[in-house]
């Protein structure tokens, strides 16, 4: 099946302006980190992305970064939430060479189907279509059912991750009905959820500074795309870079830059830094990763990006 002109004209990044192809992000991040002394020999890469196999396809961001940095520590579970928790983060920090550097990518993901549908993706042999992120779509559908009781507890010990996602997503859904695209809105809320969890765990884990000299955190939305028969388009996905910080034990400011793109220009990381400056560190402090863009609070459906 060949794409018709309407399909071919669909912009997969319509709701994620400024998204960069995976290879561009990998190259730009590597250049930025290299300037800060991050080398394969002294850096350990970690990712907090969803378990979905589509995120690990060849030439996608995780694959590229794993090959560049050599290894990776898995912090994420469903929807990209860092379910490894503080214990996982501490273990990760213990594994880096002494006085080495940590680099964490966190990113919820979203499929953009062949017809441009946000939250959908073709998978080989699945005729009925499929969701991505399935956990986010599933949580949103469950919470949107008429009369659905708000989740308040871990009700099922065999489904802890999904229960967490429902609890955290529920209060973030106000405004979704006014959104031009509900799944794009939900995806940005998932970014917010994952960011809060990731940065919260870092703030609550001062012991990691005994193991490393610096930590770089990059956040965004990973976009998945497949062709009409469900084969991942090699390198066809991308990352909407939404924020980044460098945290130096000694409080030095990083000068690394990630190229900006599209409608995201004009964003600064100041807001990101302000939000987390109050976080309690014993040794480290948040510093702006110049050139990274950040995302503001999403207050309404039409305002995906803060001002
Ligand atoms: Zn997922």
Image (cartoon, rainbow, N blue to C red):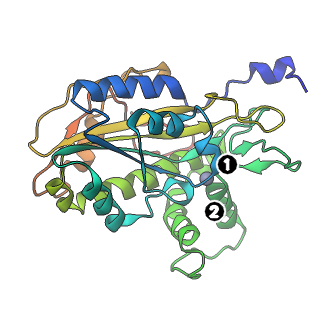
For mark 2, what is the residue? Answer: 139
How far, Cα to Cα, is label 1 from label 2? 12 Å
Q: State the residue in front, 198 or 60.
A: 60
Q: Is residue 59 left or right of residue 275?
A: right
**Element at label 2:** helix
Report which quarter residue 163 is drawn in: bottom right
Residue 303 in sight in this render = no
Q: Residues within 10 Å of mark 1 (few under 14, many from 20)?
A: many
x and y percentages locating residue 228 in the rendered image: 83, 33
Mark 1 CB near ligand 1 (8 Å cut): yes
Q: Is residue 87 left or right of residue 175?
A: left
Question: Do the numbered discs 1 and 2 sit on residues whose CB atoms are within 8 Å?
Answer: no
Task: Indicate which disc residue 132 carries.
Answer: 1
User: Which residue is located at x 21 percent, y 30 percent?
Assistant: 37
User: Which residue is located at x 59 percent, y 75 percent?
Assistant: 159
User: Which residue is located at x 53 percent, y 61 percent?
Assistant: 169
- Quadrant (top left, top right, bottom left, bottom right) of the C terminus: top left
Report which quarter residue 200 is drawn in: bottom left
Does residue 24 sit above or below 78 in this rendering?
Answer: above
**Element at label 1:** loop
Q: Nearer the viewer, mark 1 or mark 2?
A: 1
Mark 2 CB near ligand 1 (8 Å cut): no
Q: Is residue 192 left or right of residue 40?
A: right
Residue 165 in sight in this render = yes
Task: Indicate which disc residue 263 carries.
Answer: none
Does residue 307 sit above or below 31 in this rendering?
Answer: below
- Quadrant (top left, top right, bottom left, bottom right) of the N terminus: top right
Report which quarter residue 247 is drawn in: top left
Does residue 93 sit above or below 31 in this rendering?
Answer: below
User: Which residue is located at x 25 percent, y 58 percent?
Assistant: 94
x and y percentages locating residue 82 in the rendered image: 43, 58
């Amino acid at each position: 099946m060949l794409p018709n002109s309407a399909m071919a004209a669909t912009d997969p990044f319509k709701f994620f302006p400024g998204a960069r192809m995976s290879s561009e992000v990998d190259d730009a991040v590597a250049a930025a980190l290299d300037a800060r002394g991050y080398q394969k020999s002294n850096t350990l890469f970690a990712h907090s992305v969803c378990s979905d196999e589509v995120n690990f396809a060849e030439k996608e961001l995780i694959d590229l970064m794993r090959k560049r940095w050599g290894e990776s520590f898995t912090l994420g579970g469903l929807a990209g939430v860092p379910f490894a928790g503080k214990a996982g983060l501490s273990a990760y920090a213990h594994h880096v060479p002494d006085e080495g550097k940590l680099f964490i990518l966190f990113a919820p993901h979203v499929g953009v189907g062949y017809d441009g549908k946000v939250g959908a993706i073709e998978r080989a042999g699945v005729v009925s279509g499929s969701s991505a992120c399935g956990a986010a779509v599933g949580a949103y559908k469950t919470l949107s059912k008429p009369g659905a009781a708000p989740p308040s507890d871990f009700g099922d010990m065999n489904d802890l991750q999904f229960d967490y996602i429902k609890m955290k997503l529920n209060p973030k859904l106000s405004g979704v009905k006014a959104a031009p695209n509900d799944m794009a809105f939900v995806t940005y809320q998932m970014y917010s959820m994952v960011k809060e969890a990731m940065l919260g765990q870092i703030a609550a884990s001062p012991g990691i500074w005994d193991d490393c000299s610096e930590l770089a955190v990059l956040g965004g939305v990973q976009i998945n795309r497949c062709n009409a028969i469900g084969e991942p388009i090699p390198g066809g996905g991308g990352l909407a870079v939404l924020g980044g910080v460098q945290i130096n034990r000694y409080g030095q400011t990083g000068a690394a830059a990630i190229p900006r793109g599209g409608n995201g220009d004009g964003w600064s990381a100041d807001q990101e830094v302000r939000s987390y400056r109050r976080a309690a560190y014993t040794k480290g402090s948040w510093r702006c990763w110049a050139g990274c863009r950040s995302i503001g609070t999403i207050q309404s459906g039409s305002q995906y990006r803060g001002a």
